[in-house]
Amino acid sequence: MKAFFRLAEYKVLLYRLLLAYVFYFISRLLFLCYNNEVLQVTSVVDFFSIYYHGLAFDTTAILYVNSLFVLLSVLPFWVNTRQGYQKMLFYVYFITNLLAYATNFIDLIYYKYTYARTTISAWELVQNESNKGSMLFRFLVTYWHVFLLFIVCAVLWIYLYKKVGIKHIIYPKGKIIYGSTSIVALLVISTLMVGGIRGDFKKSTRPINLVDANRHVTRMEQADLVLNTPFAILRTLRVKTFIKVPYEIEDQVIDSLFHPVKHYTTNPKTTPNIVLIITESFGREYIGAFNKDSGIKNHVSYTPFIDSLASKSLIFPNAFANGSKSIHGMSSVLAGIPSFKDAFTSSPYSKQNIESLVSILKDQGYDTSFFHGAPNGSMGFLGFGNILGFDHYYGMTEFNDASQFDGSWGIWDEPFFQFMNQTLSEKTKPFFSTLFTLSSHEPYLLPEHLEGKFPKGNVPIHQCVGYTDYAFKKFFEAAKKEAWFNNTIFIITADHCNQVYYEDYYKIVNRLAVPILIYTPDEKYKGVDKHLSQQIDIFPTILDMIGYDKPFRSWGRSLLDTTTTEPYVINYNGQNYQFQQGNYICVFDGKKAIGFYDIKDKGLQTNLISKRNKEMDRVELGCKAFLKDYFDKIIDKQLGSR
């Protein structure tokens, strides 16, 4: 009679689901081992406390992924215990589970570059690459140990699955009992699965989401250890992140805080050439000139040329990126449009008239061009460049010399810098040109003839930073000989940060610390400005420098002006918004402030929210005002209007 209640089948089903929990535990442990420098879990007790809270997120992912498998296991098909049916279940189970499980292994490596669990938005990066196959092969070779760990886990999982099977049962009679009990069991299991996927059974709460991981940790970066990657991907499928926020904030308040419509009249109108260089992964940490007052003892610089250039430039050692990916950097720097949960460039709102450096300088008679040594279209740069309206795009196709291909991403920085110099020297003046470099990118390789020339440092990227710095040196040496050089403004920044060595740059706010440098051959702009600054400030700064005398829209501020708009920085740490201004850092979850920290507390160690004061209220209002105007203008397609 017990057979009619299918107890043996349910026990095996439970065993198979528990196996998933075991292997999710293993992947979380591996995630910690690969990323503990960032996560900073200091004890076994802390890890198991985090793991306990992570079980809810594991449950959601496991039940989502196994929903078809569970359904096929419990439906009363009468043939469920037959060998052929069980074999079919085996394939359903492992095809779905291993595909999802593999994403956890991606973040063993990828997390170091984004400081957030991978979400569905990662597809934005991959879909624009023309060499996906070769990139996958290179990653498998470079990170063979991660691939091997996945294979070992998969083989062990399959072995344990097969250790417990179901004997075939023939039901000569009692089909009514079999069917009715199966339906009852299906209803009970379905109810439990709904609760597990939601995170609880309370009608008053929404299903758990990425931000809920923050409730269970004292250090915000540890929220990513609570999460798992399948959960992060599933929870961002078909999720609209570009939606208007419900804050009641008057336009006058927004105008008073950010002056989003700028109109500069201080500087005389000029038309110098402008060369803007966005340097791949060039975190502020690597550059000595930007760390003189950082407090880091025995800081080592890997950029001797940039350091020398900085002594003749205006530099901003308190600058931050407005996003964590390369395409985020492009929209932030060129158009003053930051990205938060997802890239603005991949949203349905990117295809609109956008007022930017490109559009304004084109109207002023500038020849506009974008240089990137990767295959044309890589990173989504060509597509967004077309939206902005660049006159010319120069990629690997235009360079047209495969002998300088690095074997991974594109043309080495040194020859591509020289290609840009030659191209600019043939252009009609004035010109506005942007170069996006690529050699300081994983897998951190150097041209063979330069092996051993640069210090290897403490992490693999250090020698590549040295190489890109060398490429800068060779470029400036060549450009100085050209007629256009002396009448040119050079701006150097980075798209985002990368591998970290010094503890200070592991801090959650400093993960987005980038350099901003402005150089002119006449050294008109020179010194160190320690005010808060960010990528979106570059757009209005350039227009202020050239004396552009018409109104334009920008959320940033001119870095030459600290009085009109109080310096601030806004970005997103993978879980929450961070808004720095005045004496405080406000951590904002999209609805309310969940923390206030001293402006020097870049690790977000001491939450001062219990001592809330008027300045904190003002800082939170600034964050809300920015987000309201940001989403309103993007969604209403007003980025090209004033």
Image (tube, grey):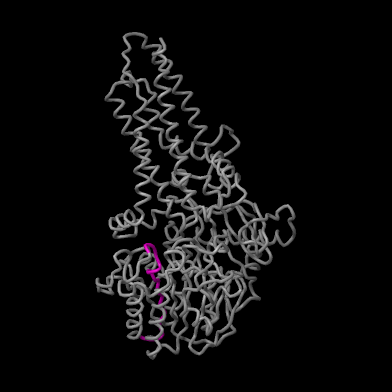
Relative vertical location of residue 486 with respect to residue 508 in this rendering, above or below? below
**Is 627 drawn above or below residue 309 in the view shown?**
above
Q: Residue at x 28, y 74 (%)?
A: 399
Residue 538's spot in the image, x, y percent?
52, 74
The relative height of residue 161 versus residue 563 in the rendered view (above or below) is above
Query: As rendered, which of 560 and 477 lies closer to the eye?
Result: 477
Task: Name the side, left or right, on which 422 lies relative to 500.
Answer: left
Question: What secondary structure characterizes most of the magenta part?
Answer: loop
Query: Is residue 380 found inside the magenta-colored segment of the image?
Result: no
Query: In which quadrant is the C terminus drawn?
Result: bottom right
As drawn, is 399 to the left or to the right of 466?
left
Let me know if residue 549 appears in the view: yes
Identify the magenta region: 428-443
Q: Quadrant of residue 581?
A: bottom right
Q: Position of residue 214 (x, y in %)?
A: 58, 47
Give whichever of 491, 23 is nearer the camera. Answer: 23
Residue 499 place in picture, x, y as percent = 47, 62
Total number of numbered discs in the rendering:
0
Q: Is residue 355 visible?
A: no
